[in-house]
Image (spheres, helix red, strand yellow):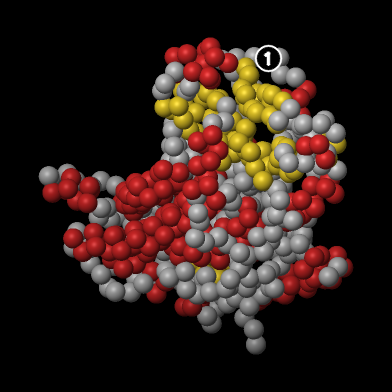
Amino acid sequence: MSHPVKTPKKLIEVALPLDAINFASAREKSIRHGHPSTLHLWWARRPLATARAVIFSQMVNDPSWKWELENPGEIPPSNIKASWAAGRKRLFAIIEDLVKWENTTNEEVLEKARTEIRKSWRETCELNKDHPRAAELFNPDKLPAFHDPFAGGGAIPLEAQRLGLEAHASDLNPVAVLINKAMIEIPPRFADRPPINPKAQAEFAKGAKWHGKGAAGLAEDVRFYGQWMRDEAQKRIGHLYPRVEVTAEMVAERPELKTYLGKKLTVIAWLWARTVKSPNPAFDHIDVPLAANFVLSTKEGKDTYVHPIVGAGGYRFTIRTGKKVGEVAKHGTKLSRGANFRCLMSDTPIAAEYIYSEANAGRMGAKLMAIVAEGDRGRIYLPPTLEHEQIITKALPTWQPDLAMPDNPRWFSPPLYGLKTYGDLFTPRQLVALNTFSDLVGDALERVKTDCNIATYPDDIRSLRNGGKGATAYAEAITTYLALSISKMSDAQSSLCRWKTTMDQSIATFGRQALPMVWDYSEANAFGEMAGDPYVSLKNMMRVLDQLIGSPAGTAFQSDAQSQTQSTSSVVSTDPPYYDNIGYADLSDYFYVWLRRSLRAVYPELFSTIAVPKAEELVATPYRHGSKEKAESFFLDGMTSAMHRLAEQAHP
């Protein structure tokens, strides 16, 4: 005989302060510093405000619950309804405070919400105290665990943890699992500990005290070893990133550069255009640019553009300033959408078929159009120099990812143009830099272990993946964040990065949920202390870690939603993938190849496969399943199975 569970009606079943939640969620999109989304890119992240509000309101009882259980089917009198409205107004006020970004780490606000959750839980436990499994399911002193089986970017489990629930996150995708480990699993394990790096230890020896809380000590160590890693990389490959000298020839063309004459300036980025041989027989020995535009800056008062000067023997690029930006500058050599350009030498059209043919035959090259340098009052644009065009010939990568991109033009355009593998998306200099930093992750691991011994950090010899909390696991924890910073570096260091003329800066590869072809691209300086410099990214990442709470515990693990068991007797809240909206597995291979190179020794099971698992991924991808109909059936059947499993397992 089954024993039904008495379930109080939850606030989420009745009403929510939607305007406040929507406003806070929309506002989050403009917040970068300290936002967990800056830890690593993930597509279609849920707003933290929404996740926090949903979890709170699914855990908290609606004020009407007791009367409705005791008076089933009856119409409540007006005075009772008024008391319910007052109770909801009080709960709404808690939510309205809870969803504000500035209250994300406000312990007073969070504790109000946790208190309300615990109160509702005790009411539920009291209601079910006579249930045969009451001791197992309804312990008033212990909240049920939380599980998100489609954890993705981790917003939902992170907010469950913030609200006092033991959070468990699972996903089939190893990149998602790693992001969740970095957010909910690692910080609580090493919470409230001082840093062990030599600089901090020297300060402690002089009498300094550590007052940091939560994961602040861990963040301080990650910053220290990230700086060490950058310094070591600069020793090894800094020669590939020379400064640029302002010459007399440059000043002759642009007198405003006179104050910089003879100075060597730090390069922010090199701006390149892809090239093919001119299809015109008269110029078929010349590589002509495929440039979508020649505009460099549209900032007020700083209008700058590339001006090609064509001669009988070829062409060269110069830089012009001023508002008289002609159509040539605005459109470069592009004629229309797709691979349709004109020959700079003859002004004749270059057919898309010709570009496809040349690119797939391996004859697509690149030519330096401009150098962006750091001036006294912002960016200055300089013409190419022979030294800077030829320096890349000294970049000789020893390894590059050979994993092929999928044959799916909807999300992946580069394979149409001969860029077949993920390794093809990077310039030789970018590959050398990514290889160097990836190799240094392993060196940092050993260095942290040594420094832990010097700082007498206890060691239980267990690894991070086996639940270790000592020096061995701590070293692996630090290298997890260092590897994530290198993965983020790959997003800022590819030949699919664009130069944003309104901001005077390089923007990352993933501007949207796809890898489109980019004809003129920005190659950022890996040591430029701007976008593209991994240490700049790492410091922003640590703003997140500085604010992560130290409890309760959390876990993140790889699992297929259709076969997982973690949801057993857990509270569940999730945001599953939607049909074919985003190709998570295919897209995340871009990062997986670099994370695997850095972390395979730390997480051998997580990175055991050559690519991200795809066969079980619940996405309706026609190219993978043979047709749109088969893809849809796969998605619907799989999602039905996953939801059925959740319904069976979740806490009653």
**Does residue 485 appear left or right of residue 59 in this picture?**
left
Q: Nearer the viewer, residue 116 or 570?
A: 570
Q: Residues within 10 Å of mark 1 (few under 14, many from 20)?
A: few
Q: Nearer the viewer, residue 200 or 134?
A: 200
Screen quadrant of the C terminus: bottom right
**Is any atom of residue 613 visible in this view?**
yes
x, y percentage for residue 147?
A: 55, 66
x, y percentage for residue 408?
A: 77, 59
x, y percentage for residue 190?
A: 33, 60
Q: Residue at x 18, y 45 (%)?
A: 203
Q: Residue at x 30, y 55 (%)?
A: 192
Q: Residue furthest left?
A: 206
- Relative to 92, is 166 above or below? below
**Does residue 289 appear left or right of residue 613 in this picture?**
right
**Does residue 599 appear left or right of residue 170 in this picture?**
left
**Does residue 600 appear left or right of residue 209 in this picture?**
right
**Is any atom of residue 430 visible in this view?**
no
Q: How many marks?
A: 1
Instruction: Report the amino acid beneath label 1.
Output: Lys
- Relative to 18, is 587 above or below? below
Q: Residue at x 60, y 36 (%)?
A: 368
Q: Which residue is mark 1?
A: 323
- Relative to 413, is 96 above or below? above
Q: Residue furthest top?
A: 255
x, y percentage for residue 162?
A: 47, 53
What is the secondary structure assignment of the residue under circle 1? loop
Q: Residue at x 41, y 27 (%)?
A: 264
Screen quadrant of the N terminus: bottom right
